[in-house]
Image: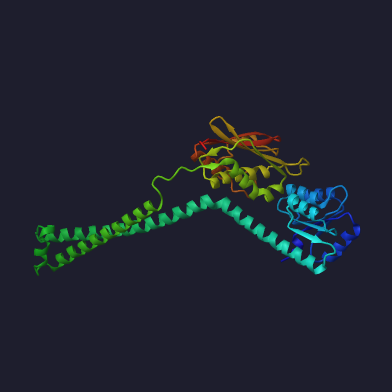
Amino acid sequence: MDYRAYPILYVDDDRTNLQAMQYLLEDRFTLLTASSGEAALAMLAAQEVAILIADMRMPGMNGAEVCSRARDIKPDVVRMIVTAYSDLHAAIDAINRGQISRYIPKPYKAQEMLDILRNAIDFVTIQRGVREMEMRLLRGSPQAAAQAVHGELAELLAELGAELRGSIEQASDLTRAAMVAAQDRGSDVRPAALPDVAARDERPRLVELLDGARRSQADAEGTVAKLEKLVVRLRTGEPLRPPPVRCDAARAVDSMVRILRPELDRHGEVEVQIQALPIVPMEPSSLGQVVMNLLLNAAQAAPPGSQQTHRTVIRVAADGADALVSVTDNGAGIAPEDRDRIFNPHFTTRAGGAGLGLSIAREMVARAGGSIDVVSTPGGGTTFTVRLPRLLP
């Protein structure tokens, strides 16, 4: 693993301590340094950082406060406190306010510090891997799962249908041949007369044809029986009347924002406003995917080269009998000529985009009896509002 790909930010007001850390980590890690809490937080907001190490005793803003504020800016950054003071109350304060992962006393041993940082980066790597897996599942699970199930079912039914058609056609061909042979011989072929016909040695060809027809008919009936069993299995595999789905919209939104937070933070600021706790007729995962599509679109709406801080606000509210989930950004907005097409499958204005996110979101919301509206001003941002019926708690 290349540990240099995971920047470490070390904040300490003592220049000697900063130089000592630089000497220790050079050629092994990527180190960023700051001499004050304010400077460290500014760097944290502007750059990619994996680990934050803060000295506990600093003028103006101590290490506990730095870690606490860092948690709001970049929640996934691993936070550590290092200090020469054996202050139990300071340690408790740092743990409670900043949720630090390690409290390191000075003077620390060089090898111990290196091991601590390697372990922390290993943890970050695992954490990011899990998040990437979550993102892939969230992006593709409903459609991929449906396609896989439908594909497998279609393959099975096609195979059985072909087998059934082949058996029936074979039976029909043999039966027609038997009837033709019987007519040529002037015989009245009836099912009840089959034993008598079979007993006559002068008609072996007719007996052979009729026996073949009977075997083919039996094969066709066996295939029909297999198909009926498959239908029964498919029907019993899912309840005929599934229980109504429902979820807490606020909780689903909060969970999705937590998962997406690292990605969203790379594009700007995100604010969550919970003004109500409505229950809506959707699976949490389905509502989560709708929210994911809207949030990622909002995060990527920042105009290139803009000096303005990109901001996204997601709000959960209630409006009479309806629940509202809205996502607002201050990005580039949507061109008027594109507004009527943004929900069309495969329509996208982003290079490399699939153009399916909004189409899928609208379909999922519509299945729940809701709708998605959009209000946008070119250069003035966009608001998507999901309106869903509220259920009783």
Along the line of sight, the residue nearer the viewer: 227 or 187: 227
Q: How many labels does the image show?
A: 0
Question: x, y (%) of residue 321?
Answer: 53, 31
Considering the image in quadrants, where does the N terminus appear?
A: bottom right
Relative to residue 185, is residue 2 drawn left or right?
A: right
Relative to residue 11, is residue 229 drawn left or right?
A: left
Q: Can residue 321 be seen in this view?
A: yes
Along the line of sight, the residue nearer the viewer: 26 or 147: 26
Relative to residue 340, is residue 182 drawn left or right?
A: left
Residue in the image at 66% along x and 61% along y: 126
Q: In which quarter of the image is residue 12?
A: bottom right
Residue in the image at 26% along x and 62% along y: 219
Question: x, y (%) of residue 324?
Answer: 58, 35
Farthest residue in the front direction?
Answer: 88
Q: Quadrant of residue 313?
A: top right
Relative to residue 175, is residue 385 drawn left or right?
A: right
Q: In which quarter of the image is residue 307?
A: top right
Q: In this view, does 4 lie above or below 300?
A: below
Question: x, y (%) of residue 268?
Answer: 72, 45
Along the line of sight, the residue nearer the viewer: 60 or 138: 60
Q: Is residue 183 visible?
A: no
Q: Is residue 227 above or below residue 292?
A: below
Question: x, y (%) of residue 375?
Answer: 63, 33
Farthest residue in the top direction?
Answer: 320
Q: Is residue 128 above or below residue 257?
A: below
